Image: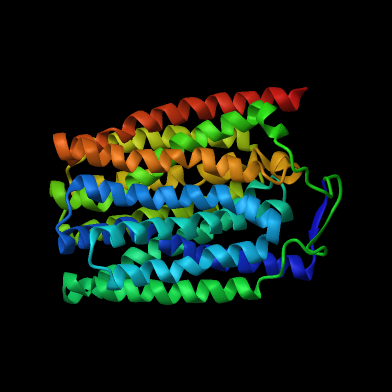
Amino acid sequence: MNFKLTARGKHQLFTSYGVFIINGMLALSIGSLLPFIRDARGLDYVFAGLLVSLHSIGNLASSFLAGPVAGKIGRKKGILCFNIFYAISFLLLIVGKSNPILAIAFFLTGFTRGATSNFCNSVVNDLAPGKASILNGLHAMFSIGAFLFPLVLTLITAGGAERYVYALIMMMILGIISFLLYLMIPDPDVAGNAKEEGTPEVKEGGVGFFKEGIFWLVVLTLFFYLCAEQGVIGWMVTYFSDTGFIDEKLSQITASVLWIMILAGRLTVAWASTRMDKRKLLPYMGIGIVLFFVALLFARQTALIVICIMGFGFSMAGIYPTVVSFTGDLIHKYSLAWSFVLTMASFGSIIMPSVIGSIAEHAGIYVGMSSVAVVVILDFVLILILTAYAGKKNAK
């Protein structure tokens, strides 16, 4: 397939990249702010885990609804309806005092994040179907926002933990900026975004993708990947703060280290995927997440912990966008395919934080985090099955 973006398509692509930087900051704010909110509100592990899960439930809800809403009113109007809750969610975190308000706010952070992910992945896949390098570029933007937030939060709270409220105000302002960017983005449902050959011009509205083996393998692979990702992102700062394995002030920095390496990894994978078959590249990433996470559980020295975090972040970096690229043809063909992939896989990010929180409440945070080792191993096995299946399908 030959592919060339028009000026309108380039505008759409780069605006999507910009919005995804802000979405990365939103995603990391959940885990990074959790210790401050937990201390300020006197929350236990179970309720803290519930909050992270509510963020993921909101993510799931909007991921599921974004497709049908876009089908009714168009993708641009749809994303504006969802994105308005970005600023509202952080306003609630600022002014809300009760646990129910806190729960609603965390739900809404996920509600806007999921719609953004749906919109940007769908748009970029439309512009460049199945191109792992372009998708990795999109997710590299997410990584930039993700590693920036913990650094900014560390600077903001240097004068006292109670100053975390200023980070909430900053996120509310970014929510307003995100909404304004969506107002300016070219409508993806208007012709003239890209000139393409060899791809369907009109998407089908059915659910024929349910009959495709590649659909189910991608869903399962992403499910266990999101279990690991949200488990680590949601609990890593709390894990290091509570176990005392490293200095408490360095705990926030671990999140930035993780996402700096994720950024480096996604840029590397974006480059490597243009030179190496993604079916060969993906298993190496799977090996990396297993080895480095297991090593992290046994690490006690600060230097070794940092090395394991770096290795884990670099290894996990390209898994999500590369796995998504296996469904490029399905997403381009079926208008509902991406919503179902994202919705079904997102159950992993909903379940795992609460699992970790429940285990931590009864057996300690170390045992809770250790449960992630099981899902990274399962994810590696599914990666091997997915790449083998895709290889056989292409050989036919």
Residue under the point 38% across and 31% down? 375
Residue under the point 34% across and 28% down? 374
Answer yes or no: is residue 396 visible. Answer: yes
Q: Which quarter shows the C terminus? A: top right
Check the image and report above or below for 394 versus 256.
above
Quadrant of residue 297 within the rendered picture: top left
Q: Position of residue 262 (x, y in %)?
A: 44, 52
Check the image and report above or below for 346 versus 208.
below
Q: How many marks?
A: 0
Which of the pair 44/248 is nearer the observer? 44
Which of the pair 383/315 is nearer the observer? 383
Check the image and report above or below for 184 versus 347.
below
Q: Which quarter shows the N terminus? A: top right
Answer yes or no: is residue 134 visible. Answer: no
Quadrant of residue 231 within the rendered picture: top left
Q: Locate residue 290 relative to residue 139 in the image: left or right.
A: left
Check the image and report above or below for 35 versus 201.
below
Q: Locate residue 381 relative to residue 103 in the image: left or right.
A: right
Quadrant of residue 340 within the rendered picture: top right
Q: Position of residue 61 (x, y in %)?
A: 49, 49
Residue under the point 26% across and 73% down? 165
Q: Position of residue 300 (x, y in %)?
A: 17, 42
Which of the pair 89/100 is nearer the observer? 100
Q: Position of residue 366 (x, y in %)?
A: 19, 38
Which of the pair 105/287 is nearer the observer? 105
Q: Locate residue 344 relative to residue 205 in the image: left or right.
A: left
Q: How is the image coloured?
A: rainbow
Q: Locate residue 294 relative to residue 187 in the image: left or right.
A: left
Farthest residue, direction right = 197
Residue under the point 35% across and 39% down? 352
